[in-house]
Image (spheres, helix red, strand yellow):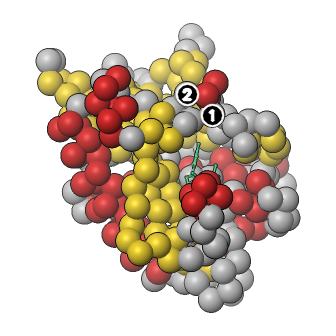
Amino acid sequence: MARRRQIYEGKAKILYEGPEPGTIIQYFKDDATAFNAQKKGEIAGKGVINNRISERIFTALGGIGVPTHFIKRLNMREQLVREVEIVPLEVIVRNYAAGTIAKRLGLTEGERLPRTVIEYCYKKDELGDPLVSEEHIACFGWASQEEMNDIADMAIRINDFMSGMFAGIGIKLVDFKLEFGRLWDNDFSRIILADEISPDSCRLWDAETDKKLDKDRFRQDLGDVADAYQEVARRLGLLKDDKGEEGAVLDFDEHRNKRGK
Ligand code: CDP
């Protein structure tokens, strides 16, 4: 049997050619990077958890009518998705001040923003993904006005849905990053949600204590990174919790599992 073809290796995922034309397999790695890959590490079991968390969120978003690239989860670390042409923008949705906006505008981390803010960054690692305006996006033709309208509408709907979903499990959705792609059908294309949504791409704080349950634990060396990701999965009902209630049990060590230990 021929070995499947690797299309791309990113910081947290590998993309392989899918079984049918127009499909791709996303493989979730345990690798973690921050500060434009200046900081590198590994979070044990992260790929397995992010695969499941992202599956849950994309499936739920599909259920409320947001078009996404997600087709199905294949196994612990892989999911089958539709091949899209990625729009070279990181779409950041913010409800509370944190990260770069807090630094840039001198806001206190955790401060509720007067309203939800959407920001766009140009996806270009060499430049450190600079913040851009809609003027730049139009000027350089990164996306059309119609596509930008669809992207902004979807970002707001996704934020409304996800804020409610996380609030229901005692988590504050501080901010998150989305990526969109064009799905081509002959000469026509439409915008769909792509990439992943996970604690790698969201800031998630415990609603009571403000404890960080996301990649900031890795960025800021706060410790217990894998535990925080597991906590999010557990609250989403993706992990068997302490009381041994029913739920899909995640196995964080596939190799150990294969050896039957
Ligand atoms: O987090 P950072 O300081 O790099 O940048 P930010 O603009 O404050 O990030 C806003 C949100 O987008 C956070 O939830 C980040 O985790 C996420 N993000 C991401 O997933 N990937 C990036 N390349 C940049 C931000």
Q: Quadrant for residue 224, please give it.
A: bottom right
Q: Position of residue 164 (x, y in %)?
A: 39, 77
Residue 123 placement, left or right of 65: right
Q: Nearer the viewer, residue 200 or 73?
A: 200
Residue drawn at x 55%, y 37% is 130
The answer to whether residue 47 is left or right of residue 60 is right
Q: Which residue is mark 2?
A: 124
Q: Are marks 1 and 2 in contact (CB under 8 Å)?
A: yes
Mark 1 CB in 8 Å range of ligand 1?
Answer: no
Residue found farthest to the front = 106
Residue 230: horizontal and vertical position, in percent? Answer: 68, 66
The reply to whether residue 192 is in sight is no
Vertical comparison of 144 with 178: above or below: above
Report the residue at 51% width, 62% height from top.
175
Amino acid identity at mark 1: Gly
* Of 49 and 158, the residue lying toward us: 158
> Nearest the camera: 131 or 23?
131
Residue 182's disc number: none
Which numbered tag is attached to residue 128?
Answer: 1
In this picture, residue 61 sits left or right of residue 215: left
Query: How packed is label 1: few (under 14 Cα within 10 Å), some, or many (20 or more)?
Result: few
Q: In the image, what residue occupies the spot 29% across and 51% down?
A: 152
Picture quadrant of residue 28: top right
Q: Which residue shows up at 32% across the image and 36% down it? A: 135
